[in-house]
Image (cartoon, helix red, strand yellow):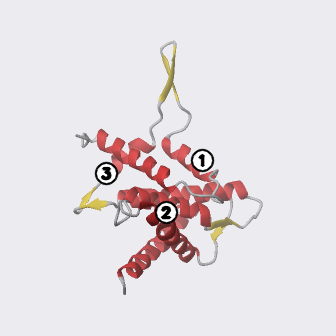
């Protein structure tokens, strides 16, 4: 099996696992019954590799041999939102479908991020990532009482994914930079930034 085929096969297995795990985690979803589209993992895998090979690699030609994890995370999230692998039995739940798929996209991103290793060492640990994605910034101080922004990173990012227009060019690079900043912030919490 050629290297490219092996990578595509490995990613297909990851997509299958992510879909299966998300279905188990979300089985008690109070919004209603849902299922996956036919061949969900295969369609996700195909779309991801087309996005990576036909769009992203040509844009980076001469700069990178392999896609950096931030771009992999971004391309994976955007793939989910383009394919929309989860559907509700009640077809009128369009907004709920977008949110469910955005939550799945975010879980895929976290899975990639938390399993990312360089020289067999985790890039960052889950405690610091959780602290970053759950953080809400102070936006005002009214008579000594702090007012915090309504959404944490996770909630705002899921909303962003939910309303993302996938009909045009996908913001793979800018979304990749978002994930880069999450890692930098997590490393800063752990005093790993020189």
Q: Nearer the viewer, residue 16 or 70?
A: 70
The residue where tag 1 is placed is: 159
Helix, strand or loop status at disc 3: loop
Helix, strand or loop status at disc 1: helix
Q: Nearer the viewer, residue 74 or 32?
A: 74
Q: Which numbered disc covers residue 125?
A: 3
Sequence-wise, which precedes: disc 3 or disc 1? 3
Q: Residues within 10 Å of mark 1 (few under 14, many from 20)?
A: some
Helix, strand or loop status at disc 2: helix
Q: Nearer the viewer, residue 137 or 50?
A: 50
The image position of residue 46, as x and y in percent, is 53, 75
Q: Quadrant of the C terminus?
A: top left
Rendered position, 32 above or below 158:
below
Residue name at image x 36 percent, y 41 percent: 185
Real-space CA distance between mark 1 and mark 2, rounded to the nearest whole angstrom:
16 Å
The residue where tag 2 is placed is: 76
Real-space CA distance between mark 3 and mark 2, rounded to the nearest whole angstrom:
21 Å
Q: Which numbered disc covers residue 126?
A: none
């Amino acid at each position: 099996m050629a290297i490219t085929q092996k990578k595509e096969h490995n990613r297909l297995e990851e997509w299958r696992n992510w879909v299966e795990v998300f279905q188990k985690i979300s089985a008690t979803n109070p919004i209603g019954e849902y299922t996956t589209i036919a061949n969900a993992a295969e369609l996700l895998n195909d779309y991801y590799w087309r996005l990576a090979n036909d769009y992203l690699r040509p844009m980076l030609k001469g700069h990178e041999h392999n896609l950096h994890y931030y771009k992999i995370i971004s391309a994976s999230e955007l793939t989910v939102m383009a394919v929309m692998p989860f559907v509700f039995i009640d077809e009128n739940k369009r907004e709920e479908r977008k949110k469910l798929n955005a939550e799945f996209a975010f879980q895929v991103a976290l899975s990639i991020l938390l399993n990312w290793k360089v020289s067999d060492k985790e890039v960052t640990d889950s405690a610091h990532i959780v602290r970053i994605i759950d953080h809400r910034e102070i936006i005002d101080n009214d008579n000594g009482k702090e007012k915090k922004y309504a959404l944490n990173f996770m909630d705002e990012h899921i909303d962003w994914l939910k309303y993302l227009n996938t009909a045009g060019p996908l913001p793979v690079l800018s979304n990749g930079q978002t994930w880069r900043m999450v890692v930098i912030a997590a490393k800063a919490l752990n005093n790993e930034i020189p």
